[in-house]
């Protein structure tokens, strides 16, 4: 049994390999780690990071802050105060920089509903069928990704945090009041940091016959990549699997939405055993990742990622575009390049791997997929479509944007053919929550 040991800014120098990190990178960990959340653990350190080639090691980059993850100006300011200033002014500076890093991208605050006069801080309801639940004890992770788009969940920006502060009963009532909701997706942070009994306390009420509308429970997690022992040798690992069994026996489908950024995360005996045990319960494992510079910006890596996932019986689900937050400037890639990576990998694998959809941007309006680059009436264009939309009627209608070789997010695109706006834009302005409210209790 492997005992979990985490390392953060406070104790990372005790990592056995810490001395082998070059001095400049050690300094960067201190400086950048004061702004972006930093946490790793003994599994990542012992089994995933290649310590002999730190300079380009994707798993090191995924967990350890690097100098370039802060803008040069921010880096200089933090470095200066860290070594020459007082704690108070350092704290104020860090707070200011964090707010400048767009802590909650894509208008997520619009997804948080008010219900019976109470704002449900631990729920997002953007797409008709699916609600996101943010259980309070699940708002941390076994290690932190340096590109994380949920980083305010773990930093000192309490007003930016999604978390269930309200009575859980209200959340269940909210679902009942929205009969079209069939899916609940537990997310975070990582809900798999919770004990089996806590997780059960959240899930079990949904299995009762009075909550039959819930057909599908999903758990979004990076534990398979960062702490697979959660499903194998942890003290309550068997209890976790029993909970999964119970979900299936209650006639619901369970999907573990596994977050894998690099093939190396699928290479250890521990992850293979964890996948095997989860699948034995009858749960599905669906996989997703953003496409990230310095981590997986190569079609060969994606080809390998898809093959290994399918080889273990997982179902590829999404390739995302990195969101505009935190260290985005370090990880971002032009949309055109994301699409090329997707296409080249997709072309190389069999149909079984092609359940992956992407590259997809989780924008304020919905999940927008870049289908490809084309040309029409003499204009080079992106062909786009919604995989999910705030208005379900927008989904699966191809639409067109002027091609750009540099744009990294949807808001940098212009409609093609001289149109003034995209087909959904005027509606989006008025839309926000009305449609979901319209649905509530109507059936
Ligand atoms: C992606 C996402 C979902 C789930 O969408 P599916 O297409 O059903 O996987 C739900 N809510 C939000 C806010 C999302 O971003
Ligand atoms: S596992 Fe997910 S929520 Fe946790 S740090 Fe990584 S991206 Fe963020």
Image (cartoon, helix red, strand yellow):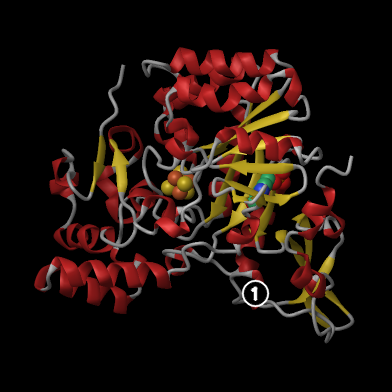
Quick one: which residue is furthest to the left in this view?
Answer: 84
Q: Which quadrant: the C terminus?
A: top right
Q: How many marks?
A: 1
Q: Residues within 10 Å of mark 1 (few under 14, many from 20)?
A: few
Q: Which residue is mark 1?
A: 411
Left or right: residue 49 versus residue 193 is left
Q: Is residue 386 above or below residue 441?
A: below
Where residue 166 appears, x then y in whole percent?
53, 42
In-front residue for pair 314/173:
173
The picture quadrant where one finds residue 257 is top right
Percent of width and height locating residue 404: 67, 78
- Is the N terminus in the top left, top right, bottom left or bottom right quadrant? top left
Q: Secondary structure at mark 1?
A: helix
Q: Position of residue 412 (x, y in %)?
A: 64, 77
At x 51%, y 38%, the residue is 135
Camera-nearest residue between 172 and 415: 172
Residue at image position (17%, 44%) is 11
Ligand 1 lies under 8 Å from the Cβ of mark 1: no
Relative to 351, does residue 367 appear above or below in the rendering? Answer: below
Residue sitting at 65 percent across and 60 percent down?
A: 361
Left/right of residue 35 with respect to residue 253 in the rendered view: left
Query: Residue 386 occupies which quadrant of the picture?
Result: bottom right
* Location of residue 60 with respect to 92 vertically, above or below: above
Residue 18 coordinates in the image, percent (x, y): 17, 46
The answer to whether residue 353 of the structure is visible from this angle is: no
Q: Can residue 9 be seen by looking at this rendering? A: yes
């Amino acid at each position: 049994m492997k005992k979990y040991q985490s390392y953060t800014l406070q104790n990372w120098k005790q990592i056995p390999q810490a001395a082998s990190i070059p001095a400049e990178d050690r300094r960067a960990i201190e400086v950048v780690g004061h702004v972006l959340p930093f946490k790793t653990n003994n599994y990542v350190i012992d089994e995933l990071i290649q310590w002999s080639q730190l300079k380009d090691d994707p798993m090191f980059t995924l967990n350890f802050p690097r100098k370039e993850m802060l803008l040069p100006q921010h880096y200089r300011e933090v470095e200066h105060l860290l070594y020459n200033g007082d704690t108070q002014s350092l704290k104020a500076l860090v707070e200011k920089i964090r707010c400048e890093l767009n802590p909650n991208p894509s208008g997520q605050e619009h997804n948080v509903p008010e219900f019976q006069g109470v704002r449900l801080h631990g729920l997002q309801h953007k797409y008709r069928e699916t609600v996101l639940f943010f259980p309070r004890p699940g708002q941390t992770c076994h290690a932190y990704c340096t590109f994380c788009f949920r980083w305010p969940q773990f930093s000192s920006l309490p007003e930016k945090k999604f978390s269930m502060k309200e009575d859980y009963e209200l959340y269940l009532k909210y679902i009942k009041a929205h009969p079209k909701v069939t899916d609940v997706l537990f997310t975070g942070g990582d809900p798999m940091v919770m004990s089996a009994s806590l997780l059960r306390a959240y899930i079990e009420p949904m299995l009762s016959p009075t909550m039959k509308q819930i057909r599908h429970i999903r758990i979004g997690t990076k534990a398979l990549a960062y702490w697979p022992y959660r499903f194998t040798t942890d003290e309550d690992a068997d209890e976790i699997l029993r909970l999964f069994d119970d979900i299936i026996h209650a006639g619901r489908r369970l999907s573990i939405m596994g977050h894998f950024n690099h093939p190396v995360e699928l290479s250890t005996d521990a992850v293979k055993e964890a996948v095997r045990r989860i699948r034995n319960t009858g749960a599905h494992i669906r996989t997703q990742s953003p496409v990230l510079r310095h981590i997986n910006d190569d079609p060969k890596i994606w080809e390998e990622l898809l093959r290994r996932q399918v080889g273990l019986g997982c179902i590829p689900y999404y390739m995302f575009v990195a969101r505009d937050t935190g260290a985005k400037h370090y990880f971002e890639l032009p949309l055109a390049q994301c699409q090329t990576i997707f296409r080249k990998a997709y072309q190389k694998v069999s149909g079984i791997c092609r359940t992956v959809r992407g590259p997809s941007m989780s924008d304020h309006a919905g999940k927008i997929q870049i289908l490809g680059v084309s040309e029409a009436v003499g204009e080079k264009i992106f062909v786009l479509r919604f995989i999910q939309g705030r208005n379900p009627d927008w989904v699966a209608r191809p639409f067109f944007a002027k091609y750009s070789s540099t744009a990294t997010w949807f808001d940098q695109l212009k409609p093609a053919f001289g149109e003034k706006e995209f087909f959904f834009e005027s509606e989006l302005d008025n839309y926000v929550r009305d449609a979901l409210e319209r649905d509530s209790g109507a059936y």
